[in-house]
Image: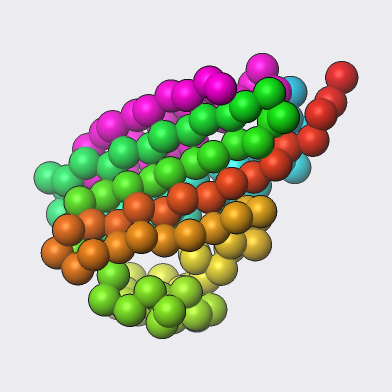
Amino acid sequence: MNRMTLSFDAKMENEAFARTSAVAFLMPLNPTVDEIMEIKTILAEAVVNCMIHGYQGREEGQVRVSVSYDETHRVTIEVQDSGVGIEDITLARQPLYTTRADLERSGMGMTIMESFSDEFEICSHPGEGTTVRLVKQLQFHE
């Protein structure tokens, strides 16, 4: 098992840092271009959700990203905030649902993350924050 954890301010300019750091960490697995794009998309959606929804655009919060993988190339990603939490997880997972229509959010972030993952779960407590955990099995490549 190999693991890394990043913690950074909930500022939009840090989203690219999270994506590129995680992908660089996974390079020993020799992921395909498609796998890299899917992981980058998952991370972008999860991190931006923390910033826009979890912290409601306030930049004083912290986002924590943990990435690990094992010898079978099973990648686990957790993205966590200590923001407002999600009142209704079932509703939040519905395609096109958004609490930030004012920002022209599509409401597809959870759906996209889930579609690119082999396992996807959300743990959230109102007033305490949210953790998104997903697993993606990468293929073996020579």
Residue 95 image position (x, y, % from top left): 53, 79
Residue 54 found in image quarter? bottom left
Residue 71 image position (x, y, % from top left): 68, 23
Q: Nearer the viewer, residue 57 or 117?
A: 117
**Within the magenta stretch, is there residue 16?**
yes
Q: Nearer the viewer, residue 95 or 73?
A: 73
**Numbered circles on residues, count:** 0
The prevailing secondary structure element of the residues shown in magenta is helix
- Report the residue at 65% width, 36% height from top: 74
**Within the magenta stretch, is there residue 91?**
no
- Report the residue at 34% width, 29% height from top: 6
Q: Which residues are magenta?
A: 1-29
Residue 66 relative to residue 128: left or right: right
Up the image or down, 114 lies above or below 30; here it is below
- Report the residue at 28% width, 42% height from top: 63
User: In what quadrant of the picture does the C terminus appear?
Assistant: top right
- Report the residue at 73% width, 37% height from top: 138
Residue 65 image position (x, y, % from top left): 38, 37
Residue 85 found in image quarter? bottom left
Q: Nearer the viewer, residue 101 or 41?
A: 41
Q: Is residue 126 visible?
A: yes
Up the image or down, 44 lies above or below 2; here it is below
